[in-house]
Image: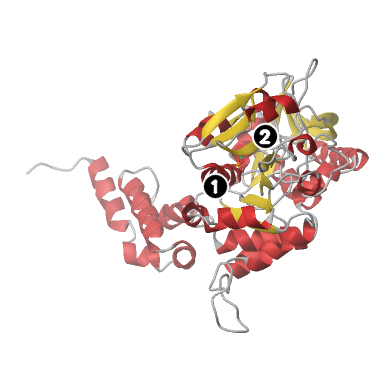
Amino acid sequence: MHDDTPADGAARDGRRRIPRTDALLADPRLAEAARRLGRRPVKAAVAAAQRRARAGEIPPEAVADEAAATLPPTAAALRPVINATGVLLHTNLGRAPLSAAARAAVAAASGVTDVELDLATGARARRGRSALDALRERVPAAEDAHVVGNGAAALVLAATALAGDREIIISRGELVEIGDGFRIPELLAATGARLREVGTTNRTSPDDYAAAVGPGTGFILKIHPSNFRVTGFTRSAGIAELAGLGVPVVADIGSGLLEPEPLLPDEPDAQTTLASGAGLVTASGDKLLGGPQCGIVLGRADLVRTLARHPLARALRVGKMTLAALEATLRGPAAPTTEALHADPSELRERAEKLAAALTEHGVDASAVGSAAAVGGGGAPGVVLPSAAVSLPAHCAARLRLGDPVVMGRVENGRCLLDLRAVPPEDDAALAAAVRAVHE
Ligand SMILES: *Cc1c(COP(=O)(O)O)cnc(C)c1O
């Protein structure tokens, strides 16, 4: 036997003093965390903290603190983010944020709910019928409505149910890549439908479509080029010019505007598109509509029914929380995306100045500057929304990204800009607190 070195002895003493797992799990903070998060992550955090104490990295009496500090606020890893990028619909940030009314509706629907039941008769009812009613009320030109998982799913369902292995006639100017490498022509081809391309990149006339229509035609598809613009010597056929060709016209309007938006005159809307003669409109729920991720199908009753009764519809259907969020977005107060789009630039400037002044008082190098915001990948390419930002040193960007709450700004000309257009005014205090926290 040989003697322990003093260091070995101290380590062993330390180990003896490391609190046991059951004692740690009884700590009020960790017991509360277990109710919030489940026992598994709390036990894992406790074990990790005990290991650190055994390794001498933290003192034994800090084990409970360490375990509590490493636990996340909710059982899902997704973190709330303040979107100060100036991009209203940021795909990487989950596109449209839900309104308070929609969040409350989601919470209420997340338990057991009558999503597919008629409470008056006790019989099965059309799934999500009140959300579908809300869509029809907002878009009088739509005879019926259907909702699927996202805009791409709406296109897939339309292609499968209406074209099958027949042709979809589409302009070469509308063969669009929607993002992350996904291309609409490839998506449509994956359904087994055949694409019949007409016209050229810059010019397609109604005659081009008319010459292609025949017994093998499933439908004509119009895709709104939502993320780019072709200017110069261009021609494209309008819905009204195609509506008389004897085959259905399906219009993918992308952004989900239900009625015209004066601030975005080039963005198509469902009501006008259907009134012009489209048989079906497809759109995303989480772009300019400002609702949950979903794909909205509106239009002629027979076409909507063909989609809704197709076997594939069952694979693309949405959950009760999506239907609740959609209905509350349609019937409730203006969505945050709508508020952000309509925010008054002079009010944005005032908020930026107030925030910059308060931060300067705390020693932060902050100033209010003019900024240019954008709708984002969700639509309206080329539209500049005048805005205001708090300008900070560039190194703040990375720290704010790891802060609590997470703040996403954008780095421009060597400064970190926090653009306020997509930040709801009620988040200004949290934004200021997050900046001060990373400054200290
Ligand atoms: C965004 C978009 C899509 C895809 O919709 P998702 O909801 O993202 O699936 C399809 N077509 C157009 C024109 C779009 O803008």
Q: Badge 2: few (under 14), some or many (20 or more) residues near its Cα, within 10 Å?
A: some
Q: Badge 1: few (under 14), some or many (20 or more) residues near its Cα, within 10 Å?
A: many
Task: Give the residue at the far left of this rendering.
Answer: 1
Quadrant location, the C terminus? top right
Decide: is 361 above or below 126.
above
Residue 183 seen by the camera: no
The type of residue carrying mark 2 is Ile
Determine which of the numbered discs, if any, sits on residue 264 in the image.
none
Decide: is 29 above or below 351.
below
SS label for mark 1: helix
Residue at left 72%, top 46%?
Answer: 256
Instruction: Say whether residue 39 is left or right of residue 262.
Output: left
Decide which of 435, 428 is in the foreground and name it. 428
Residue 434 percent location from the top left of the image: 68, 44
Decide: is 115 above or below 16.
below
Residue indicated by mark 1: 157
Residue 67 seen by the camera: yes
Instruction: Say whether residue 380 is left or right of residue 193.
Output: right
Q: CA distance from mark 1 to mark 2?
A: 15 Å
Task: Locate residue 416: give its quadrant.
Answer: top right
The type of residue carrying mark 1 is Leu
Residue 165 percent location from the top left of the image: 48, 39
Decide which of 432, 192 is in the foreground and name it. 192
Instruction: Say whether residue 225 is left or right of residue 219.
Output: right
- Sequence order check, earlier mark of 1 and 2: 1
Residue 107 percent location from the top left of the image: 61, 66
Determine which of the numbered discs, if any, sits on residue 223 in the image.
2
Residue at left 37%, top 56%?
Answer: 46
Q: Kindly indicate whether the residue at mark 2 contacts the one at mark 1 (C-beta within 8 angstroms).
A: no
Task: Give the residue at the far front of this rendering.
Answer: 215
Does the numbered disc 1 mark a residue whose Cβ is under 8 Å from ligand 1?
Answer: no
